[in-house]
């Protein structure tokens, strides 16, 4: 049985089987977590992403996930998922749930035992932190019996939201 770990830190340092990248639909790097993962992984990750088939200039639609090798990261895989842009997406809650669900499913399909997530859509995509956290942790609790799950959070306020919400969900 796995555990859920909530950490304040840099996801690119995670020693897990799969690191989840909060990617954009082109999967070619960008800002925030996406840029940090691409910089840490090096050019091999970009080359792997470029191999993913495109449909109308999109490699990964919102809510879906794709998997590549991890380049120079300590992980075996990077799972790229595209979260919703909160004030633009017409179904942000459904798409955020799907981003987490599809990431977990890909990890299990590739025999991963551990996975690290950022707070998907909580940066420039402006998803309200409390709601995003509740979605992320609720879905994680469905998979914790099969995986060790790590949430790497980039700042103290977001870390606090995850810690408090996790305690409430598990009744501690």
Image (cartoon, grey):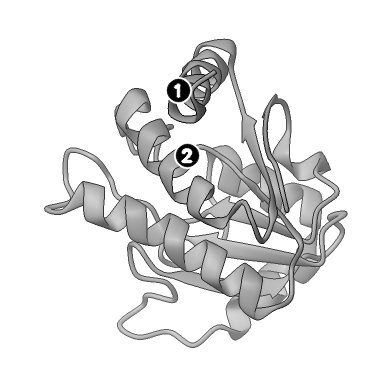
Q: Viewer-proximal residue, 28 or 9?
A: 9
Q: Is residue 114 visible?
A: yes
Label drawn at residue 137: 2
Which residue appears at 55% of the width and 83% of the height? Answer: 52
Q: CB of mark 1 within 8 Å of CB of mark 2?
A: yes
Percent x, y for residue 166?
51, 26
Label 1, label 2: how far apart the Cα atoms are: 8 Å
Which residue appears at 81% of the width and 67% of the height? Answer: 76
What secondary structure is marked by label 2? helix
What secondary structure is marked by label 1? helix
Percent x, y for residue 104?
55, 63
Label drawn at residue 154: none
Q: Is residue 127 above or below residue 92?
A: above
Q: Residues within 10 Å of mark 1 (few under 14, many from 20)?
A: some
Mark found first going from the N terminus, 1 or 2: 2
Label drawn at residue 165: 1
Percent x, y for residue 32?
55, 37
């Amino acid at each position: 049985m796995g555990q859920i770990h909530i950490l304040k830190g840099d996801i690119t340092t995670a020693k897990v089987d799969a690191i989840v990248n909060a990617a954009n639909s082109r999967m070619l790097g960008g800002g925030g977590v996406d840029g940090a993962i691409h910089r840490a992984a090096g050019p091999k990750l970009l080359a792997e992403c470029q191999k993913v088939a495109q449909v109308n200039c999109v490699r990964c639609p919102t809510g879906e996930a794709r998997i590549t090798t991890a380049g120079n990261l300590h992980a075996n895989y990077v799972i790229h998922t595209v979260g919703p842009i909160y004030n633009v997406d017409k179904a942000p809650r459904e798409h955020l749930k799907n981003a987490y669900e599809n990431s977990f499913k890909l990890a299990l399909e590739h025999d991963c035992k551990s996975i690290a997530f950022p707070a998907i859509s909580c940066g420039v995509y402006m998803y309200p932190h409390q709601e995003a956290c509740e979605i992320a942790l609720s879905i994680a609790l469905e998979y914790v019996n099969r995986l060790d799950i790590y949430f790497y959070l980039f700042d103290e306020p977001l870390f606090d939201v995850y810690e408090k919400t996790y305690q409430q969900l598990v009744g501690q």
